[in-house]
Amino acid sequence: MIGRVKISNLNPGEIIIPDSRLFLLVRRSAVRSSKTGQRYIDLDLFDGETSVNGKIWDVDDDNETAAQSGNIIHVLNGKVTLYQSLKQISINDIEALPFDKIDELCPDILPESFYKTEQLRQYWDDIVEQLEPKHRLLIDKFMADEKMWSLFTTIPGGRSMHHACRHGLWEHSISVAETAMAISQLFAEKYEVNVSLTVTAALLHDVGKLFEFQINRSTSMVERYTDRGRLLGHIYMGASWIEKFVAGCYPDDEDLKIDLIHILLSHHGEYEFGSPKLPSTIEALIVSTCDKLDADCDAIRSELVSGQPDGNWTKKVFMLDREFFKRRTDADEGAPQPDDDHN
């Protein structure tokens, strides 16, 4: 494997040339205009460990095509700069890396789920085994659709945040279901929660994302939102799919259909978060709460693991509009620490 430069190795003022071997995953790409009307491309870039902002100031068709979200780029010419005390890469020229070169040049660049696929499958199977037969049949039929199941277990949960890694949607769905199961079982007797219904809905709550994303076939990362996704959104598309799906499995069970549709329509919890309905059953409230908790925690973890911290604090986590404190670990104990009592 040919070595490559990481973002942590770069210093402000450093010139980047092809020999620098700087390969970066484009997590997000947006063409914007400066105050003077100049077009530029704003990039969220990732090297497998660390994220950095990038700018392409001279936009042409080749650079715009190469810098599409989901692509891996080789920076051919650029410079490392500082913006608001954070590293930024000012890019003059790039090329998209062919898929067959990824394993040779940067095999560890694609963000992967925290868990191995064998673990995810075991966690999923363990959850499904605990469902009531009626709900287990729904999940079995969903898994039997090879195209849907392959996408569901491969694609990210989001474009640039919220489990934005391969197998991220699967990981997130499992995490929401596990948390929902624990809460439902705790509350079941007192609040008459239907545990199996809650967990089934949690497993499928984000199924609409299969229709919302345009996936890069080479990397399985999100390139962009589909036109349908931008017009309708994954909440509506997921609810529409679940209505037809349940009707096909249980045409006479209107209650099951309505329960699942409502949970999918309300799983973002609040109108301001794009939810067309507020959770109005206990099961819907549990799913929406668990969904937000897992998404928020993943956003925090992403900054703690691969962001650019300011001392013991992350930079502002966009989803939560605040910074988060990173507690010292045993490995940090030997490092010099500021004396809070020293003036």
Image: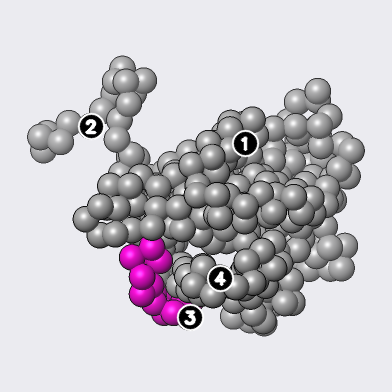
Q: Name the residue under label 2.
A: 338
Residue type highlighted by circle 2? Pro
Q: Which marked residue is nearer to the observer: mark 4 or mark 2? A: 4
Indicate the secondary structure of the residue bearing disc 3: loop
Residue type highlighted by circle 3? Pro
Q: Name the residue under label 3.
A: 276
Q: Residues within 10 Å of mark 3 (few under 14, many from 20)?
A: some
Q: Which marked residue is nearer to the observer: mark 3 or mark 4? A: 4
Left or right: 315 with respect to 12? left
Q: x and y percent of residue 71 in the render? A: 77, 52
Distance between mark 2 and mark 3 Cα atoms = 48 Å
Residue 221 vs 235, above or below: the answer is: above
Residue type highlighted by circle 4? Asp
Left or right: 222 with respect to 192? right
Q: x and y percent of residue 328 in the render? A: 30, 30
Q: x and y percent of residue 64 in the render? A: 80, 65
Rendered image quadrant of residue 106:
top right
Point out the tag, 2 or 3, that comes first from the N-terminus.
3
Point out the tag, 3 or 1, that comes first from the N-terminus.
1
Residue 279 among those drawn in magenta: yes
The span shown in magenta is 270-285
Point out the tag, 3 or 4, that comes first from the N-terminus.
4
Q: How crowded is mark 1: few (under 14 residues within 10 Å), some or many (20 or more)?
A: some
The numbered disc on residue 278 is none
Distance between mark 3 and mark 4 Cα atoms = 24 Å
At 64% across and 44% down in the image, what residue appears? 167
The numbered disc on residue 253 is 4
Q: Name the residue under label 1.
A: 121
At 15% across and 36% down in the image, what residue appears? 340
Res 77 visible? no
Distance between mark 3 and mark 1 Cα atoms = 32 Å
